[in-house]
Amino acid sequence: MLAKWAVLCVSIVPLLAAQESSMAAAPSGLRCEYLTDPVGIDVPQPRFSWVLEHAARGERQTAYQVVVSSKAEAPASDQWDSGKVSNGQSVHVVYAGKPITSGQTYYWKVRYWDSGDRASPYSAAARFETGLMESADWKGQWIGGANQMRKEFTLPDRPVRARVYVAGLGYYELRINGRKVGDHVLDPAWTTYDKRVLYTVYDITERLRPGANAVGVMLGEGWFKSRALRMQIHAEMEGGQTVDVATDAMWKTMPGPIQSDSVYNGEVYDARLETPGWDRAGFDDAHWKAASAIDGPKGVLSAQMMQPIRVVDTIAPVKLTTTHPGVYIYDLGQNISGVVEMRVRGPRGTRVQLRHAELLYDDGTLNVENLRAAKATDVYILRGDGSLEVYQPRFTYHGFRYVELTGYPGAPKLDTLRAKVVHSDVRPTGGFTSSKQILNQIQRNIVWGIQDNLHSVPTDCNQRDERMGWMADAHLYAETAMLNFDMPAFYTNFLRDIHDVQGADGTVTDTVPHRYGSRPADPAWGMAYPLLTWYMYEYYGDRRLLEQHFDGVKAWTDYLRTRSRDGILDYSYYGDWVPIEKTPGNLVSTFCYYWSADLVSRMAGILGKGGEAEAYRKLAGEIKDAFNARFLNAATGVYGTGTQTAQILPLFLDMVPGNRRGGVFGALRDDLVYTRNTHLATGILGTKYLFPLLTSTDNSDLAYELATQTTYPSWGYMVENGATTLWELWQNKTGPSMNSHNHPMFGSLGAWFYNALAGINLDSAKPGFERVAIAPQVVRDLKWAAGSLDTIRGTVASSWSRSDNGLRLEVTIPVGSQAEVRIPELGLAPVTLSESGHTIWKDGKYESGPAGITGVRKSGEALVVEIGSGNYAFALDRE
Ligand code: BGC
């Protein structure tokens, strides 16, 4: 018996050990500079992030080891072995190995040790690949010519590794041996070309062959409004031989089938002018002209380190109607950014036209008035060789729900057209749903509105003759974008774009790149510089961006200071744009000036710049005093002319003197609830800051009523009037004036869905969701709400449902993070609280037990639970 027992013990021990070590699972979601296996990184010290996995709750990383190798198979660390580093950091770990060099692939993996010093297995290997790190690495020249360029070259053998580095302005389509390379469209991203041009790197190893090869490039005008190409191919053969092919005046050029192309106006494509075989070897280009070496844009070449624009989805039209003989109207049922793919067969030279619009007139015909000068018209002229011709424009995009088709040979059918949804391919990372249908529809419109406007820069709209990186729009919907999409690489790039436009005097511009609007920017537009830098820190813990942009943000603030008098900033162009009731511009500008100074002070504090932290705190204090002295009317007790926005802004930033706060808030509440019958009168700024203000002042019921309002002005009003995206104006206008129907700036509301309704909040003291505050607002008739978010550290989720006697709340916190969970008692006190069936609060006391929970306390009308990582199911019940 004893012997048997001993055997049993012996066999159990290794089993337990195995189980223990597997609890800390291999890290997943490896990223380098926010990207998964990026090809084309040109920062000398890239940063690594990974997501920790662990079977137990309340777990964290106590140490990590990163190994970087130049060989795929080699377990060796010929580049870098960090060794076991005692550190909880799982994001932004800076590469510190041998210098990385141009055009190399590096492989990396990571493991970690958990709270019990148990090592996880290594992660699967991830990769990153460098672009051209030095300008001297560029062998090719800028060349110009017609919109088709070609070159043939020979390889002695099949390459073992081949890459192409391409910068093609305005837009390019790269083709090798008869086929398009990669799946980017409208590449490269739009930048200030005098400062910077982005290039893309593709792996073309499989596309090249021994002997003759051909490369062909089509060029569109894009935002460059001209054409220029600089590229090079580097191919390595077995045995070490290399072949380089670079742009020079030996390339050949010839106009192709694209007769004209314009972002706004569309494309004219004459298929009769196609030059079949031009992108293959052996093509007779004797009559093609030589390309010319040109100066090219002045900007430096930088790797495009963000998600490219792609065709992200295909949608079939839902309806086809005929308004006049030969005039066909397609309805996609959704306002999108993109182009149409058309199928057609017919006589040579037939000219088929596609016009795009957001709106129809009552008689069903196309309303293009709000596109202003943008023609949004694509024309396809048939080859007419009897085959089925498929056309999809390359170098344009439109914002549209409806398409008018004319000139079509025969009778088109519903499936003659399909729409291609085109935008920066940022992965959806979040989700929000609730028991309230109107909120779900608004969430849907917000998500569509934002993604439609991510076109390598955050645009204001996607349809009319604008589509600019308007800076206020950019910062107003940034948080909502960060909660719904994988945004950090995109905004890292955009911050550099902002830096690229900054003048020596510190000024930034209304639009970035600067095409429209002014320099200096309206202070509320220039706010994008401090705010996006700050959001990147809050949402992703990106301290490097704080370091990189601190001087720029400070210079912008210093510029504002030169324009201020006695703490008041009087210049303003737009202020609280498109409101129902206008707020004085200098009030808005001074608020922004205050906020900029305050953010400089905070950033300085984080970066250990004590002197600047103090100096800008003092400056902010002076601005605040000046703001109150000037705009707070001692007699009426309200700011400015009493508009909602004039009260919201100082309340939101806690600028209001303590003894005045109640009065100012009361005035705001009265105006919202009584004067306007629970409606907003705010423009884009007031609207954004009202919602978090209402949450922090325990007025979530009011916020909810405003958010679910369906009469003018409200988001629900847009939905009731058929919107599938967000409008620029609260009013339902359809004429020639400014009234885009796809303008994401009012999408700021979307952040409130996550923050208040699902209750997911970050903590800027522990940024990047290292510490999370879960605080769902259980409001009015809302029965349940659910939000989830893939943060840089892993998934954060919160979902709740309520019944008459209690509340159920499920929470997910990633390994390495901690959370404070605030569970409202809902007037049910005395209550009990349990987690997965174990009581953790009873008779007004905390009962310890379940793993991961370190305490429960009562705070006001809520129970506050401290938790570590893991999944939790809380149940609050009337006792
Ligand atoms: C844009 C806005 C922008 C504004 C500046 C408009 O034309 O579409 O979204 O912020 O101009 O006032």
Image (spheres, rainbow, N blue to C red):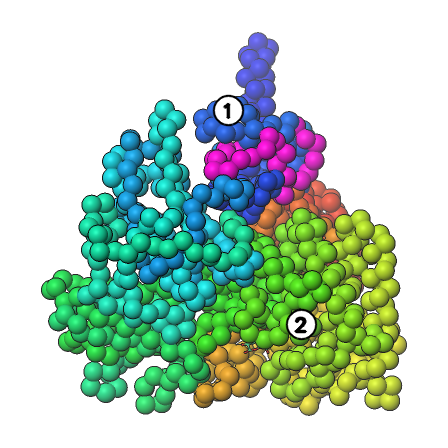
Quarter of the image with the N terminus in it: top right
Mark 1: which secondary structure?
A: loop
Q: Which residue is mark 2?
A: 520
Spatial CA distance of label 1 from label 2 is 54 Å
Q: Are marks 1 and 2 in contact (CB under 8 Å)?
A: no
Type of amino acid under label 2: Pro
Would you say 631 lies left or right of 389 here? right
| Residue 850 included in the magenta stretch of the image | no
Q: Position of residue 97 (x, y in %)?
A: 61, 31
Q: Percent from the top left, x then y, of residue 626? A: 85, 76
Q: Is residue 102 magenta?
A: yes
What residue sits right under mark 1 in the picture? 75
Question: Which stretch did the figure color magenta?
Answer: 84-108
Comparing 88 with 536, the one in front is: 536
Q: Is 552 situated above or below 793?
A: below
Which of 175/672 is in front?
A: 175
| Residue ID at (63%, 59%) | 499
Residue 101 numbered tag = none
